[in-house]
Amino acid sequence: MQNQFYRTFIAVPVSVGEGFLEARKELMELLEEERISWVHPDKYHITIRFLGDTIVSSTQVISAALEKQINTPRKLYINFDRAGSFGPLKKPRVIWVGFEQNSVFESLKFEVDLALESCGFPKINQPLRAHLTLGRVRNKLTERDGYYQAIKSMTNRFREQVRLDKLVFYRSEQGPEGPIYTPLFQKDFMPG
C-alpha cells in the first residue's frame, strides 16, 4: 500500500486591521500592471516551519508532539515593521511585511524544531525571517523600477499592531481560488 501525503506547515495565523487592508489595497493598485498573486487576508500567517509532503499517518504524531512539547507564549500584540521584497533584484518572488520584534518567532521556531526532532524531522539550521506574505510575483516584471518604487513608497504604511494568539499545524491543498488551509492541530497561546 502506498503512503498518502499531506502538504503541511506550522504557522501563527494573523488577523489584520483596516489600516493594513487600506495599505494593501493601495499597493495592489500601484502594482496592478504586474502579475502578482495576492494572498487573501483570511489566509495571512507567519510560517514557523514548512514541512512539505508529510505522511498522513504521521500528522497525529506531530500534533501530539506539538501539544506535549510546545510552551506557548502569552497572547501578545506585536508591531508590523516595513514592507519589502524577497528574491533576486531582476526577478523578485515575494512581497512581504516584517515585524519589529522577532524574538517571539525565534522562540517558537526553537520549540517547534525540538518537537519535530522527536518525530524524526531533522532540525533545519536556518534563521527564521518572520514575515507575512502579501503577494507572489508570477512573471518577469513589466516595470522593475516601478515595482521597487511602489514598495519603497509603501514601506511604512503597513505599520500596525497585530494580536498573536495561537500556533496552528496546517494542511495546504491547491484549490481553484488558491491554497486551502485546513487546521490539523491548534495550540492556543496562554491568556495575556
Image (cartoon, rainbow, N blue to C red):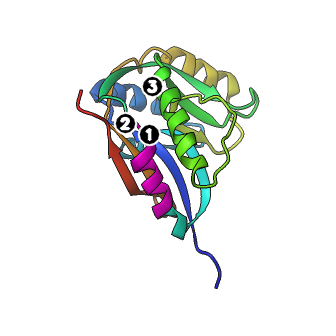
**63 falls in the magenta region:** yes
Mark 2 to mark 1: distance in Å? 5 Å
Lower sequence index among marks 3 and 2: 2
Q: How far from the left and from the top, in percent, is residue 115?
A: 52, 46
Residue 18 to residue 34: above or below? above
- Quarter in which the N terminus is drawn: bottom right
The answer to whether 148 appears left or right of 130 in the picture is: right
Front residue of 18/128: it is: 128
Front residue of 192/156: it is: 192
Query: What secondary structure predominates along the stretch shown in magenta?
Result: helix
Question: From this viewpoint, is residue 170 visible?
Answer: no
Q: Amino acid at mark 2?
A: Val
Q: Nearer the viewer, mark 1 or mark 3?
A: 3
Q: Which residue is mark 1?
A: 45
Look at 69% across and 27% down and name the residue there: 144
Q: Residue furthest bottom?
A: 1
Disc count in the image? 3
Look at 75% across and 30% down and name the residue there: 88
Q: Which residue is mark 3?
A: 104
Labels 2 & 1 near each other (Cβ < 8 A) = yes
Question: From this viewpoint, is residue 188 visible?
Answer: yes
Q: Amino acid at mark 1?
A: His
Q: Quadrant of residue 141?
A: top right
At numbered mark 1, what does the secondary structure look like: helix, strand or loop? Answer: strand
Mark 1 to mark 3: distance in Å? 14 Å
Q: What is the magenta range?
A: 60-71
Q: Amino acid at mark 3?
A: Val
Q: Which residue is mark 2?
A: 14
Residue 129 to residue 114: above or below? above
Q: Quadrant of residue 148?
A: top right
Front residue of 179/122: it is: 122
Residue 191 to residue 62: above or below? above
